[in-house]
Image (cartoon, coloured by chain):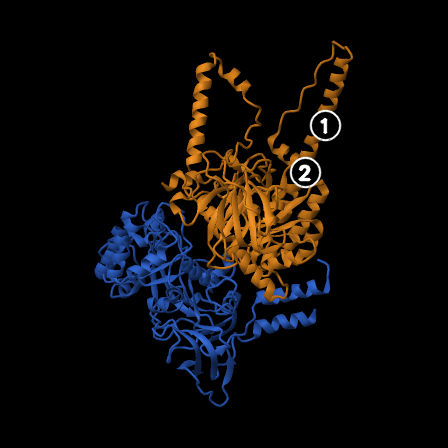
Chain colours: A orange, B blue
Amino acid sequence: MRTVLATLASVLATACAAQSQSSPETPLERAAEQPARAPFSSTYAAAASPPTLIRNATVLTGTGARIDGGDVLLVDGRIAAVGQSLSLPAGATVIDASGRWVTPGLIDVHSHMGVYASPGTNASDDGNESTNPVTSQVWAEHSVWPQDPGLEAALQGGVTSLQMLPGSANLIGGRGVTVKNVPATTYQAMKFPGAPHGLKMACGENPKRVYGRDGKFPSTRMGNVAGYRQAFADAQDYMESWKEYDAKLARYEKDKADGDEDATPPKPPKRNLQLESLAEVMRGNVLVHNHCYRADEMATMLDVAREFGFRIAAFHHGVESYKLAGRLAQEGVCGALWADWWGFKMEAYDGIQENIALVDAPEGGCAIVHSDSEEGIQRLNQEAAKAMTRGNLAGLSIAPERAIRWITANPAKSLGILDQTGTLEAGKMADVVIWNGTPFSVYALADQVFVDGVLLYDRAHPAAKPRSDFSL
Amino acid sequence: MKKLAVIAAALLLAPALAAAQDLLVRGARVHTAASAGTLANADVLVQGGRIAAVGSNLAAPAGATVVEAGGRPLTPGLFGGITQIGLEEVNLEPSTFDAELKLTAPAWQHMWRPEFDVTPAFNSRSIVLAVMRVEGVTWGTIAPLAAGSVIIGQGTAVTLDGRTDAALPGSQTLFVNWGSAGHNASGGSRAAQYMLFDQAIREVREPGSSGAAALLLPEGRNALKAYLAGGRVVFHVQRASDIRQVVRFATARGMKPVIVGGSEAWIVARELAEAGVPVILDPLQNLPSDFDKLGARFDNAKLLHEAGVRIAFSQTDSFHLRKNRQLAGNAVAHGLPWEAALAAITSAPAEIFGVGAARGRIEPGQVADLVLWSGDPLEVTTVAEQVWIAGGAVTMRSRQTELRDRYLERLRTGATD
């Protein structure tokens, strides 16, 4: 805390000095001096943190390894080393983690925090733009309320990164945003640096119910599929118009360079935000996160993706993923699933508790435990424990070092951030949880949670935990 | 294919449990949920569907089934909470949902219908029952639901063993929405809930007193009358100020209130203890998910228990009754003693719903609803290995185990998707 205050003071001092020294200038000139920043891009910067050596823990690295009596060294917000008997750098804080377990920070690929914040009020009902079945132009981050007290609760459950998604009322609900679970006044200051956007799509009952009950399109599953296909076909056409423009622009620039003074620049096509998102999906820059319960509908969506040349990062909810586990593994599509939700609607009728373990089983299988719940996100470790137990009873032989990947490395992979977090490997962000024992227990509690090396939650010092403005 | 069809038919027609026979569970870690607490190594004898003896070195009567527990834990059958199990097969399919009355004209006709009793709609053959039974949930309370009512209607505790007449005697309960839960049905103000309820009570005592503006029909007056003479009335209420008011209100009018929800009950814990009013809560409810729950916290259960309030646990979803023991385990993680957590899903709800003389504990004379566990019954890595209801061994199969086995087989044989 002292460090933060000191930093703040020096920033203020610098700012004052800059103001007094500079000559009067217009706001525009001032803006021009700032380094270029893309609109809505991340402004997140981790605070400074002292080197920290976590010693003598049971370490689950998230890569499938378990190190008994393991050490993890955090330096400058990164994992510096993972192993046994690491040497202590000068000035390092040492944490004796004997009898305790250490894992990567947990990651929830499916949350509506911020867009359906607590408390749920009419005024903050911002998760579904359910006015049109295709709203790929909306971005969840523009609905996010960073003061959602659910975020600090999730932090206490060990969650260090999460994707905030639009709801599933629409065929294509909009872009999701991946954030670090840090207290902030703006979502930009939470945004995971460099993380791609997600695109929320939804199969099955929800879109056809929301629109069909008013006699609107779509009211059937065949309507749903026509809706996705037409949207992507329109986006292909849109990409084509930009390609034509780019060609004309290149010709114009060449003509100009060749000295043609009569050359006139081409007029760019009007930007279409809806189609832009879909074009970004087809270019591979935005990752599809597809709410889809039934196996047959997942197979349909794989064919839609094939038709338009994009990939689906993960099927979310997928209570029937176990029926298609081999195919999902082959195609490299993750299953983001609940441990035991079922029965609440027809497309959830066939849910079984072995779903996650069966998706994990084939070579290349990518199982993820997700929450879709402000309650469940606080105990992803317990949900993973239930799924692991059911897998073991079914004879699938799943050790904790394997199951931990369902809530760390695999969600990171589906979000396109595995190169930065999700495992305890040297060079990665120091997103780390120290548990009071095995995390695969109903009695497990996170003792300490680090985000980029900064100790954000310490169970022994509850007063120091983050509290949103709302919680005051 | 034919073989599979035969198996499926067999599951549909198979009895939920074997006929009760004498049973001796030997060498178990017996969690009695009674004053005896936990017995590290004890035998439990079941005769005629009831617990005949609990002790050491009990002799097996001739013909009795003997189960060697090998130190594994044995608990009473678990309470599944207050849900709509058996009243809904698939939540979002209206044709399978029987828990809400939606008589429409005039509107108040469905809002004040204490005579609406969901008990006859209970489907003892629902597939949901088997899914929960194999997880050690042997009984629960079924309740009507209605966001648009103050007095929602009546429900009852039921055994989940699949018998047709599942209602447990003495457990009939009236369910009422209070605070913001009853807002829609009280003209947009919780203050009007007291006003309207008093009008209804006056109609019971003085039929015709409301003239043409009566809230209740004759059957409703009869139904409500019973609850004004010491009947059990569940109030779905969360906010501390509402809990305080409604307990005084209900007690003064002859009702025996039970608080369900109670996110802020810890704030009024001492008053609840003094009034002997129990609280049925979800210990995972720690967020200010609405303005009636700003005081929600993880240690609500612990604080209520310490103040001497009887607590039981319930989540609200018919498809998650098996989660109740996870709720209990989490309450322990947040400070509640383990024995109190087990009681909150066994003996305490049995007492609250008036069936404690027959269920909820492992004691001689109790109905033999028992669960043998693979480990700590509150732990998420533990499973129920065998369940008995009224002494009958539960068939440890459900539609979910059938699906599991079909697809495990495909995995083993490498069948393509």
Residue at the far bottom in the pictured view: B62
- Between A428 and A128, the one nearer to me in the picture: A428
Q: Which mark is residue A243?
A: 1
Q: Secondary structure at mark 2?
A: loop
Dot 2 and dot 1 within a common chain: yes
Amino acid type of the residue tagged 2 in the rendering: Gly
Q: Quadrant of the C terminus of chain B?
A: bottom right
| Disc 1 chain ID | A
| Residue plotted at (74% across, 10% down) | A262
Percent x, y for residue B20? Answer: 48, 81
Residue A291 in sight in this render: no
- Callout 1 crowding tier (Cα within 10 Å): few <14, some 14–19, many ≥20: few
Amino acid type of the residue tagged 1 in the rendering: Lys
Give the residue pinned by disc 2: A284
Note whether A317 is above or below A268 in the view shown: below
Q: Secondary structure at mark 1?
A: helix
